[in-house]
Amino acid sequence: METSYGRFVLLRPASQSAWSAPVRLVQVVRRRRRLIPSPGLYLLAAAVGSALGFGMQLLFDWPWWLFAAGFVAAVAVFFLSTAFWGPDRTGVPLAEEWLWVLSPRRAHERQRHLTLERFRSAPFALYGLPPQWPGDRYIAGWASAGSALGLGLGHGRLGAEDGPRLRVEVRHKHLSGAAKDELAEELWLEGLDNVDSLGGGEAPAWSTVTIPVDGRPVTFEWLAGGRHWAALAEVDGHLLLLQARDFPVESVELERVTDLEHYPLP
């Protein structure tokens, strides 16, 4: 499976006409094609089919255009069939995409179930703020690359433009070799008060900060900009990535999360 990385977003079922379902199913297949023909290939197929068709018409009085149309259709069917074989480009099973077309509500519930199972069966420890922290908590995101995972838990009001927010993600080290670059980019996208705080066009200047993790001090690489900051450290052989807004880094204390009851899906 190819790498799929990013913040997890639950897709809401959309009401669409049942009459458009066949068209949308074909669109899914066209989008997933491994090979995409050029227009010239269709012209070539039409030319070859027409030449053969004229010959068959002279010999057997068969309609020539059937062969022209048949050759073009054969090319189209072959390239459409590449959506069903070979490595998948999207990382999403074809059956799952079709389920979103045929029954968005069932697909939505299935997505929620699979996401919860991903977190409940996590192959590594998850971390979050201590129970006494009073804010909202939620499942914030996931990443995957084959059997490798990255799972994130969120703290703070989801979708709010102000107020404290902290995202804590644990991932396999080999899931991404550019975690610092990703965090720097996310920090910039979150909306820095001062873009120059990342050094403008220069490489961002990382420093270090100590954050307690399960009661022991852990040194994180730390990058701050305006109201936002990001941090990265290796803990028990895995990467621990933090992204925060309006959250003083000196107040952060992480603990192992053993019960996801307080981390619902958004």
Image (cartoon, rainbow, N blue to C red):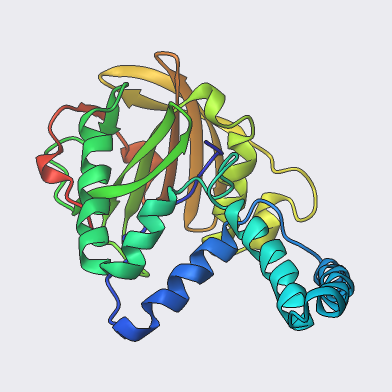
Q: Quadrant of the C terminus?
A: bottom left
Q: Residue at x 72, y 60 (%)?
A: 36
Does any portion of residue 179 appear in the rendered image? yes
Residue 255: x, y in percent?
A: 24, 27
Q: Is residue 156 left or right of residue 217?
A: left
Say if 88 sits above or below 219 in the image. Answer: below
Say if 169 sits above or below 125 in the image. Answer: below
Say if 63 sits above or below 193 in the image. Answer: below
Q: Is residue 39 left or right of residue 194?
A: right
Q: Residue at x 84, y 74 (%)?
A: 59
Residue 66: x, y in percent?
A: 71, 78
Depth check: 24 or 150 in front?
Answer: 24
Residue 252: x, y in percent?
A: 32, 37
Q: Residue at x 85, y 69 (%)?
A: 52
* Number of numbered tags placed on the structure image: 0
Q: Residue at x 50, y 69 (%)?
A: 26
Depth check: 95 or 45 in front?
Answer: 45
Does any portion of residue 160 appear in the rendered image? no
Depth check: 106 or 141 in front?
Answer: 106
Instruction: Name which quarter of the figure residue 87 lies in.
Output: top right
Q: Residue furthest front?
A: 60
Say if 89 sits above or below 190 in the image. Answer: above
Depth check: 194 or 172 in front?
Answer: 172
Q: Is residue 126 left or right of residue 142?
A: left
Residue 144: x, y in percent?
A: 45, 37
